[in-house]
Amino acid sequence: MAADAPPPNIVLIYCDDLGYGDLGCYGSSISTPNLDRMAAQGVRFTNFYSANPVCSPSRAALLTGRYPTRVGVPRVFFPVDKLGLAQDEQTMANVLKARGYQTMCVGKWHLGHTPSYLPTARGFDEYFGIPYSNDMNPRLMLKNAETLEQTAALETITPRYTEQAVGFIERNKTKPFFLYMPHTYPHIPLASSDRFRGKSEQGLYGDVVTELDWSVGEILAALKKNGLEKNTLVVFSSDNGPWFQGSPGKLRGRKGQTYEGGVRVPFIARWPGRIPGGRVLDAIGSTMDLLPTFARLAGATLPAKPLDGIDIWPLLSGQKKDHTREALLYFDNWDLQCVRLGNWKLHVGRYNSFIYGPPPAAGRFNLRLRPAELYNLATDPDESFDVAAKHPEVVRDLEARIARALPTFPEEVQKAWRETEARQTAPGEPGRLPRPKA
Ligand code: MG
């Protein structure tokens, strides 16, 4: 970029519980023409990850570039919680605002709903949206920190978010802006506006996804109308895999699981003139990569704390097709469950609920898998065939990487890991606790 070029506008659209297989360009039968076109004009990733399989931790990682277990968000927040993203963490909005950007969050926040945790206290000049999930009560609609409605009408949410986003673009077309648009849908309860209801061949879920696609089209049209296309990076992704409906594609698992279907998400980036179009990349990317990538493009100063994400502009811009990176860790709550390096994925822990059904009254707990399970995601993308016995050197290498990474995490993570390690599994029955004696 020329030294005197103005910093680009950045639009980050983030769906809630949209599966890896839910867009036309990822093989879905749901009609998503705007996102398909965005992918055709830009770059699409096939190995892009959220840092967690549920809502709040995913957002914490997206906005800070750090694992959610480092930033005080190991689990989903509920309306009774008074907590949020740790106050000593910087968000990408803080980083871009310090560089002179106008910043707005439109949509589902879910990183704390008390005043000191709301978007307007975390680097955003403006906020409009529901501060947590649409299945939580009361379903408040906020403008900045003020409550507009006690119960937002479900069928109005996507059109209203879209109107707010377009208005922000119009108001700020002469200065650099950052629009973060975390949609409420397709998280349940589902609803679409009249215009889209019953129009898809895939039921209400399909209607909702088609409406989200329409919204993306409106954003792209607003950029074009205001002559901003060539100076705006638009990024689209999701926070975790699909829940009750929706498709993880051919991947195993869904929301709440560290199988690929829980954490691998669609990722599309478009910037005419800067991102060469029509490319599909298999390189591994993470939502944690976006903060350092945006900071580089904006010429902004990175936060002082070390990041887990890396700058992926060389991939987006076509300078590189792949890159080397540290192993990616998969957590749920404080529990470390998997690690991925290249095409290898090692499962080292898994909840007891997978073995015995619903969590027992005492709560679910993480079991150490002995032996660990190794999958080759290139040849076995749905994690069906454990090949650990054939590749003991890979298992040793990945376990050594875990051992080196763990001490860099907060004590809660290490304590959870010690507890996982202490649970004895029965020999020859991977992941099983010994059965109680009759
Ligand atoms: Mg979610």
Image (cartoon, rainbow, N blue to C red):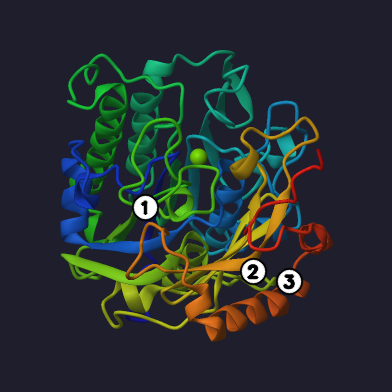
| The furthest residue to the bottom | 393
Q: Is mark 1 within 8 Å of ligand 1?
A: no
Residue 329 image position (x, y, % from top left): 59, 66
x 56%, y 50%: residue? 58
The disc, 3 or 2, on the residue closer to the chain's N-terminal end is 2
* Gap in angstroms between the C-alphas marked 3 and 1: 28 Å
Say what amino acid the circle numbered 1 marks.
Leu
Answer with mark 3 or mark 1, whichever residue precedes in sequence.
1
Q: Residue at x 56, y 48 (%)?
A: 59
Residue drawn at x 17%, y 21% as measured from the top left: 199
Q: Is residue 308 above or below residue 429?
A: below
Label 1 crowd (10 A; few <14 / some 14-19 / many >=20): many
Res 26 seen here: yes
Q: Residue 406: which disc?
A: 3
Is label 2 in contact with label 1 (beta carbons under 8 Å)? no
Is the shortest distance between ligand 1 and the CB of mark 2 under 8 Å? no
As helix, strand or loop, the secondary structure at mark 3 comes to: helix
- Horizontal side, residue 207 vs residue 129: left or right: left
Q: Which residue is disc 2 drawn over?
A: 303
Q: Secondary structure at mark 2?
A: loop
Indicate the quadrant containing the N terminus: top left, top right, bottom left or bottom right.
bottom left
What residue is shown with label 1?
251
Instruction: Provide residue 354's location: percent of width, then percent of height.
Output: 59, 43
The amino acid type of the residue labelled 3 equals Leu
